[in-house]
């Protein structure tokens, strides 16, 4: 899963958030190895009781993952990056919408991302650029 991206690591991420990102990095990489059906089930359990994440909260989590891991920042890091950002949000009591899908313009490639307030977070692409195939949204409260 990938989309073209430059290796641009965020700066100014607070120490506490960087430590949290390091804490969830290994579980995110391990979750990335699961088959889609099992991954969706695990994320469905993890999201329980969490409030929907705001765009700012989701962006901060995504930036923290990119700040601590070159793997997450890289062009093939979308799956661990999105999983790590979702887990980091969950540590703070919120949950973004975690999505996987495909790019709708050639070349067609798979991608994973998070959304908050109905928009992709940190992807810098126009609306409709990705088609969702799987989405794990915040649970109804």
Image (spheres, rainbow, N blue to C red):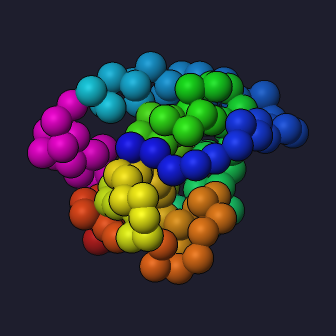
Q: What residue appears at the point 64 percent right and 25 percent down from the top-left corner?
A: 70
Q: Is residue 17 visible?
A: no
Q: Is residue 82 above or below residue 124?
A: above
Whether residue 95 sits left or right of residue 69 in the image: it is: left
The image quadrant of residue 21 is: top right
- Residue 51 place in picture, x, y as percent: 44, 63
Q: Quadrant of the N terminus?
A: top left
- How many marks on residues? 0
- Residue 133 place in picture, x, y as percent: 25, 63
Q: What residue appears at the point 58 percent right and 76 percent down from the top-left corner?
A: 126
In depth, the one of 96 and 30 nearer the eye is 30
The residue range painted magenta reads: 34-51
Residue at the limit of the structure toward the right, as seen here:
12
Q: Looking at the magenta stretch, what is its main secondary structure?
A: helix
The image quadrant of residue 31 is: top left
Whether residue 51 sits left or right of residue 18 in the image: it is: left
Q: Is residue 29 visible?
A: yes
Q: What residue appears at the point 43 percent right and 70 percent down from the top-left corner?
A: 105
- Residue 74 place in picture, x, y as percent: 60, 34
Q: What residue appears at the point 49 percent right and 35 percent down from the top-left corner?
A: 76
| Magenta span contains residue 41 | yes
Whether residue 81 sits left or right of residue 131 in the image: it is: right
In depth, the one of 88 and 98 nearer the eye is 98
- Residue 102 place in picture, x, y as percent: 35, 60
């Amino acid at each position: 899963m990938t989309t073209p991206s430059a290796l641009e690591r965020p700066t100014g991420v607070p120490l506490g958030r960087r430590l949290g990102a390091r804490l969830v990095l290994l579980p995110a990489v391990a979750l990335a190895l699961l088959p889609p059906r099992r991954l969706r089930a695990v994320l469905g359990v993890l999201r329980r009781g969490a409030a929907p994440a705001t765009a700012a909260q989701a962006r901060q989590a995504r930036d923290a993952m990119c700040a601590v891991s070159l793997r997450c920042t890289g062009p093939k890091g979308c799956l661990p990056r999105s999983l790590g950002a979702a887990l980091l949000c969950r540590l703070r009591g919120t949950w973004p919408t975690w999505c996987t899908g495909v790019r709708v313009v050639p070349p067609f490639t798979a991608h994973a991302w998070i959304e908050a307030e109905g928009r992709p977070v940190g992807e810098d692409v126009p609306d409709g650029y990705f088609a969702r195939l799987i989405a794990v949204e915040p649970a109804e409260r």
